[in-house]
C-alpha cells in the first residue's frame, strides 16, 4: 500500500460511476493520493468534463445508464493522450478486458475493487502520466531553454548554484579547486570558468596529471629545449607558457609526483617557469584551476601531497554534484545527447518512452554524466526509430564507474550504487522468470522502511544505510 508520502498534488482524477455509494467509496479510497477528484454519473456528464482538463487519470465504469464507458475513454485519451484510464466493471469479461487493453487502458479492475489494488494502480498511472507530460514539455524546449550553461546541460537547483558560483569565481585570479566524482564534468567547469573570465580570449590549456608518465610531467608543465634529456629531439613549450595570460587546468592533480609538486609550488609562488635545459626563467601570468576525485586533504595527511601546495591551490572550492542528485537533469542531458547523437549517426530518434525515462531516473549513475552519455550513445548506435524504448538502453551492460577510487558498484545490489541492505532480499536462485526491475525492488525497499519507521525519512535512511537525500530523490521521481 502506498505510504502517505505518495501524493500527487496538482494531478486531476475523473471518476465515472453511476452508482453513488461506489462513487463515494472510490473517492475515499483515492483520497490519500492527494489528487483533485471530479465525479460524474453518466457518459453525458463525463463527456462534458473532458475539455475541463488536464486529466492525469480516470476511473471509468463500462456500463453506464446512457452508454458505454469506452466512449468516455476514447474521448479522454484523444484529448489527453497521457491520461491513465483505468476501466472498472462488474462483469469479469475477458472480451471487455481485451477491448480495454486495445483501447489504451492502463488496467482493468473487477468490482468490488480492492483498496490497495486501486491505490497502487492509480499511483502507477499518475506517475506515468506525470512523467510523460514532463518528457513532452522537455521535447518542446529549444536547446537554449534546457538549462544550458556553456557545455553544461541541466536546470536543477544544485546546478543553478554551480552556474552562479562559476560566474562569481571567474572574475578573480584566485586558484579554484573543483571537487567531484569521476564523470561529473570537472573539465567542463574549468572551461566555463575560463570562458566567463576576462581571460576568455586567451588560451585555455588542460593537462590530465593521471595520464602523464612521472618522468615526463616536469617537461609537460614547463617545457624543454632540444637535447635537454634523452629523446628531447626538439624544443617544447610547456603548459605554463602555452597558457600565459590565460588559464591552466590541472586535472587529477592528486596523481602528480611529489617531486614535481615542489617545482609546481615554486612556479606558483614566483610566477616564473624555466624550461628543462635552460638557465633563464620566464615570467608567466596564469590562472590555475585544478581538480581531483580524491580527498586531497587525506592525501596530505598520508604524505602523498605537499601541505604547502595544498594551501596554495585550495583557495576557492567548487563542488560538482553527482548525477544522482540532479533530478530531472538526467532527462535533460539524455534528450540533449539523443538529439546530438541521432544527428551525427543520421538516426530518427526524437524522444524517450515513459518507461525508458523511468529507468533513467531510477538509476544511481555511478559513472555520472559520462556513463549516461555512453548509455545514450550505445542506444542510438545499435537501434533506430523515433522513440527510445527501455529495452534499447544498455543499462545492465553500462560500466559502473568507481566512486572516489573505490570498487565498482554492483548494478543489482540494494539501492543502485548503495549498500545492499534493504528489507527486500533477492531470491536464492535468480532466473528470467523471477527477476524484477531494479527500480521496483528499490521502491518496495524504501516503502517498507518508511512504513516500519512511521514515515520518518531519517530513520528509514539509517535502517537502509543510505543518505536521506537518496530517499528524497527517489520519492521525488515517484511523485
Image (spheres, rainbow, N blue to C red):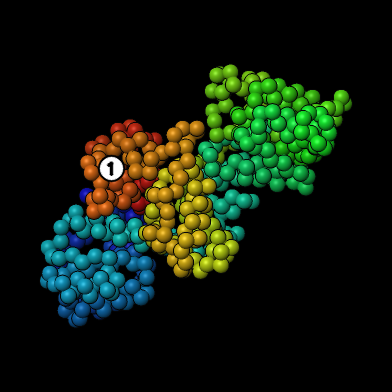
**Rendered location of residue 150, percent (x, y):** 64, 51
Mark 1, residue position: 445
Q: Residue furthest bottom?
A: 66
For label 1, the SS is helix
Looking at this rendering, what residue extends furthest in the front direction?
A: 230
Q: Position of residue 321 (x, y in %)?
A: 51, 40
Give the residue at x 19% y 57%. Answer: 117
Asked if 268 appears above or below 470 in the picture, the reply is above
- Residue at 72%, 37% (x, y): give it: 248
What x and y, as percent, mark residue 78? 36, 75
Q: Which of the pair 151/399 is nearer the observer?
A: 399
What residue do we see at 44% from left, 34% from top?
407
Q: Is residue 182 or residue 31 the one in the foreground? A: 182
Q: Position of residue 433 (x, y in %)?
A: 23, 53
Q: Quadrant of residue 466?
A: top left
Res. 387 visible in picture? yes
Amino acid at each position: 500500500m502506498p505510504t502517505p508520502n505518495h501524493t500527487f498534488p496538482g494531478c486531476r482524477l475523473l471518476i465515472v460511476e453511476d452508482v453513488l455509494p461506489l462513487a463515494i467509496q472510490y473517492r475515499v479510497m483515492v483520497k490519500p493520493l492527494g489528487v483533485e477528484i471530479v465525479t460524474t454519473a453518466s457518459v453525458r456528464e463525463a463527456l462534458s468534463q473532458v475539455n475541463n482538463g488536464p486529466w492525469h487519470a480516470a476511473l471509468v465504469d463500462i456500463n453506464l445508464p446512457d452508454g458505454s464507458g469506452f466512449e468516455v475513454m476514447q474521448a479522454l485519451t484523444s484529448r489527453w493522450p497521457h491520461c491513465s484510464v483505468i476501466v472498472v466493471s462488474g462483469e469479469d469479461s475477458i472480451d471487455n478486458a481485451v477491448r480495454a487493453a486495445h483501447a489504451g487502458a492502463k488496467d482493468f479492475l473487477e468490482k468490488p475493487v480492492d483498496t490497495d489494488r486501486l491505490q497502487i494502480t492509480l499511483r502507477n498511472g499518475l506517475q506515468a502520466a506525470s512523467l510523460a507530460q514532463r518528457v513532452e514539455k522537455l521535447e518542446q524546449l529549444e536547446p537554449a531553454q534546457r538549462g544550458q550553461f556553456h557545455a553544461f546541460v541541466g536546470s536543477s537547483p544544485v546546478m543553478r548554484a554551480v552556474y552562479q558560483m562559476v560566474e562569481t569565481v571567474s572574475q578573480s585570479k584566485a586558484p579554484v579547486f573543483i571537487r567531484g566524482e569521476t564523470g561529473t564534468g570537472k573539465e567542463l567547469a574549468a572551461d566555463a570558468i575560463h570562458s566567463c573570465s576576462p581571460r576568455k580570449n586567451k588560451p585555455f590549456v588542460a593537462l590530465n596529471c593521471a595520464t602523464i608518465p612521472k618522468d615526463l610531467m616536469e617537461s609537460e608543465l614547463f617545457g624543454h629545449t632540444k637535447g635537454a634529456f634523452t629523446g628531447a629531439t626538439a624544443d617544447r613549450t610547456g603548459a605554463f607558457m602555452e597558457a600565459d595570460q590565460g588559464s591552466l587546468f590541472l586535472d587529477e592533480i592528486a596523481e602528480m609526483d611529489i617531486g614535481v609538486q615542489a617545482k609546481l609550488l615554486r612556479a606558483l609562488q614566483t610566477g616564473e617557469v624555466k624550461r628543462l635545459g635552460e638557465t633563464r626563467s620566464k615570467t608567466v601570468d596564469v590562472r590555475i584551476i585544478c581538480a581531483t576525485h580524491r580527498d586531497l586533504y587525506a592525501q596530505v595527511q598520508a604524505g602523498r601531497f605537499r601541505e604547502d601546495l595544498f594551501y596554495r591551490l585550495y583557495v576557492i572550492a567548487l563542488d560538482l554534484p553527482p548525477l544522482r542528485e540532479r533530478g530531472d537533469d538526467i532527462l535533460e542531458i539524455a534528450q540533449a545527447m539523443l538529439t546530438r547523437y541521432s544527428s551525427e549517426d543520421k538516426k530518427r530518434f526524437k524522444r524517450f518512452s515513459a518507461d525508458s525515462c523511468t529507468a533513467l531516473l531510477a538509476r544511481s549513475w555511478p559513472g555520472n554524466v559520462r556513463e549516461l552519455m555512453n548509455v545514450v550513445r550505445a542506444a542510438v548506435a545499435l537501434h533506430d526509430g523515433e522513440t527510445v524504448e527501455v529495452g534499447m538502453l544498455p543499462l545492465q551492460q553500462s560500466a559502473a564507474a568507481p566512486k572516489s577510487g573505490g570498487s565498482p558498484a554492483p548494478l543489482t545490489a540494494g539501492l543502485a550504487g548503495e549498500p545492499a541492505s534493504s528489507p527486500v532480499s533477492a531470491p536464492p536462485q535468480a532466473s528470467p522468470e523471477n527477476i524484477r526491475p531494479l527500480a521496483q525492488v528499490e521502491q518496495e525497499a524504501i516503502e517498507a522502511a518508511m512504513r516500519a519507521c512511521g514515515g520518518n525519512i531519517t530513520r528509514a535512511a539509517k535502517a537502509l544505510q543510505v543518505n536521506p537525500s537518496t530517499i528524497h530523490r527517489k520519492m521525488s521521481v515517484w511523485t
